[in-house]
Amino acid sequence: MLGDGYHDVPKGKVAMVVTHLEMRTPNFRQVPLPDGLTFTRIKPDIDTYRDIFRRIGAPWLWYGRLVMEDAALEQIINDPEVQIYTLLKNEGPEALLELDFRVKDECELAYFGLSPALIGRGAGAYLMDQAVNCAFDIQIDRLHVHTCTIDSPQALNFYVRSGFAPYRQQIEIDDDPRVTGILPETAGPHVPILRP
């Protein structure tokens, strides 16, 4: 257990404060779909999934699905209890919404993000409305998500405005994906690289 005060982050690592949030009563907002977009459920293969994941998540140092073995990732994305959606723009996927129902009576909003092409167009509010609709269609007790301090600075407030309530915080330290070569050094420019 960490005591009060400052704690050094080892070289080659990245540290973040993780906030866990939940929604127990659905907050339906009826947000309209922005022009030029199509909301659809997809069943991507591993390469397509990782391409979407990388394009949307690299600015925020998303790396969890990039380091998984193919078989483990394939098991998740092909599980009937996992639903993956996107927003199509010009027939290309520009968003990632992943809902995980593998724990009884709840849904984890496992991944939620937009490509830079959709930011600032109202697509996030629409996609969150769809997340809530799809999740609570299954008769769950709660929808939960977590975000962290290396994610978009708007993420935490966006989740709270969307109806989620924070219930737990943790400190996470992990290998910096830019140091390990999982992501390019240009990813996540808002987070300094502590080179070993």
Image (tube, rainbow, N blue to C red):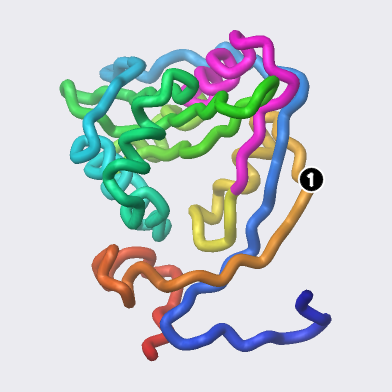
Magenta region, residue range: 126-146
Give whichever of 14, 118 is nearer the camera. Answer: 14
Quadrant of image for the C terminus: bottom left
Q: Is residue 192 above or below residue 71?
A: below
Q: Is residue 55 above or below residue 144?
A: below
Q: Relative to 116, is 156 on the left or the right? A: right
Secondary structure, mark 1, is: strand
Quarter of the view holding residue 185: bottom left
Instruction: Kindly identify the residue that appears in the image at 49 percent across and 53 percent down.
Output: 152
The amino acid type of the residue labelled 1 equals Tyr
| Residue 3 x/y as whole percent | 81, 81
Q: Relative to 56, is 32 on the left or the right? A: right
Instruction: Kindly identify the residue that appears in the image at 32 percent across and 43 percent down.
Output: 53
| Residue 60 x/y as whole percent | 42, 57
Quadrant of image for the N terminus: bottom right
Quarter of the view holding residue 80: top left
- Mark 1 sits on what residue? 167
Give whichever of 96, 118 is nearer the camera. Answer: 96
